[in-house]
Image: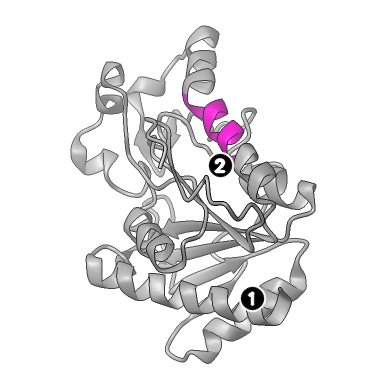
């Protein structure tokens, strides 16, 4: 493990330098550097879904313990800088998020914006790129969570999880069919989001543009708020990884 305020890496120096999977969770943490004063937000705002992917840190850690996958977990709050947005996106350093004003992001100078990118954003992507170069993964797996309902939208999001994919249709369909066959799960196809090459970073840049089949799994965050839910979903994903390995690798 390599400690860093931006990310944590696990199983990076395995003697086996050809991995079947590499696990990435860009929004695993909610770290805010002290000089940003909690982004000017009360804890109730910073720790809701706008600040991080609730439940993903525990889910990912359970998964990596079960599988030993090379793993990178983003630890900086997505309100400091969103590691899964391109630098030109307004959501990379958002002034507003789901109807919440982010005081620490209002009126940033060019210099402050560049400091955030140099300090937090670029080190994460260099580290992920180095992991990919070393391990040469056959599949990149990205984990995220989503809120059951946005403040900015009046309707609930009913899916228990979503499978997001773009170019790798066969892999995406396999995952959809596998999860739906478990029974009791409402699984969204490219829901509640779609992979957008203009508005996402890790899937297109580190996966598809490098010829690595890439899968993004979204889990509804009320299902992984506690240890029991995190363990359950880590077990589900581990079984999915096993099914992918049998089918494709």
Q: Is the residue marked by circle 1 packed among few (<14), some (14-19), or many (20+) residues within 10 Å?
A: some
- Residue plotted at (54% across, 91% down): 181
Badge nearest the viewer, 2 or 1: 1
242 vs 165, left or right, is left
Residue 84's label in the rendered image is 2
Q: Quadrant of the C terminus?
A: bottom right
40 up-or-down from 243: above or below:
above
Residue 5 point in image, percent of width and height: 37, 30
Outermost residue, left direction?
A: 43
- In this view, the residue in front, 198 or 143, is 143
Magenta-colored span: 120-128
- Residue plotted at (68% across, 72% down): 172
- Residue plotted at (47% across, 12% down): 112
64 up-or-down from 177: above or below:
above
Tell me where residue 163 sits by quadrant: bottom right
Residue 48 point in image, percent of width and height: 29, 48
Residue 203 magenta-highlighted:
no
Residue 8 point in image, percent of width and height: 41, 41
Query: N-terminal of the two: label 2 or label 1?
Result: 2
Residue 245's label in the rendered image is 1
Q: Quadrant of the N terminus?
A: top left
Residue 168 visible, this orientation = yes
Tell me where residue 45 sits by quadrant: top left
188 vs 234, left or right, is right
Residue 24's label in the rendered image is none
- The prevailing secondary structure element of the residues shown in magenta is helix
179 vs 59, left or right, is right
Tell me where residue 228 sits by quadrant: bottom left
- In this view, the residue in front, 28 or 188, is 28
Outermost residue, front direction?
A: 15
Q: Secondary structure at mark 1?
A: helix
């Amino acid at each position: 493990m390599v400690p860093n305020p931006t990310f944590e890496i696990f199983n990076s120096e395995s003697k086996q330098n050809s991995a079947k999977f590499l696990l990435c969770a860009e929004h695993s943490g909610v770290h805010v550097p002290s000089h940003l004063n909690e982004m000017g937000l009360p804890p109730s705002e910073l720790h809701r879904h706008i600040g991080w992917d609730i439940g993903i840190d525990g889910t990912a850690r359970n998964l990596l313990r079960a599988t030993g996958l090379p793993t990178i977990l983003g630890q900086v709050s997505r309100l400091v800088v969103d590691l899964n947005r391109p630098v030109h996106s307004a959501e990379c350093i958002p002034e507003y998020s789901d109807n919440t004003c982010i005081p620490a992001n209002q009126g940033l100078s060019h210099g402050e914006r560049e400091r955030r990118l140099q300090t937090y954003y670029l080190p994460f992507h260099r580290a992920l790129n180095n992991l990919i170069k070393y391990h040469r993964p056959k599949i990149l797996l990205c984990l995220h969570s989503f809120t059951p309902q946005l403040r900015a939208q009046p309707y609930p999001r009913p899916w228990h999880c979503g499978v997001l994919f773009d170019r790798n249709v066969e892999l995406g369909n396999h995952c959809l069919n596998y999860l739906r066959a478990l029974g009791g799960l409402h699984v969204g196809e490219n829901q509640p989001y779609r992979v957008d090459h203009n508005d996402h970073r890790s899937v297109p840049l580190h996966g598809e543009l490098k010829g690595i089949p890439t899968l993004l799994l979204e889990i509804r965050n009320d299902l992984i708020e506690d240890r029991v839910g995190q363990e359950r979903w880590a077990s589900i994903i581990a079984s999915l990884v096993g099914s992918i390995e049998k089918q494709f690798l």
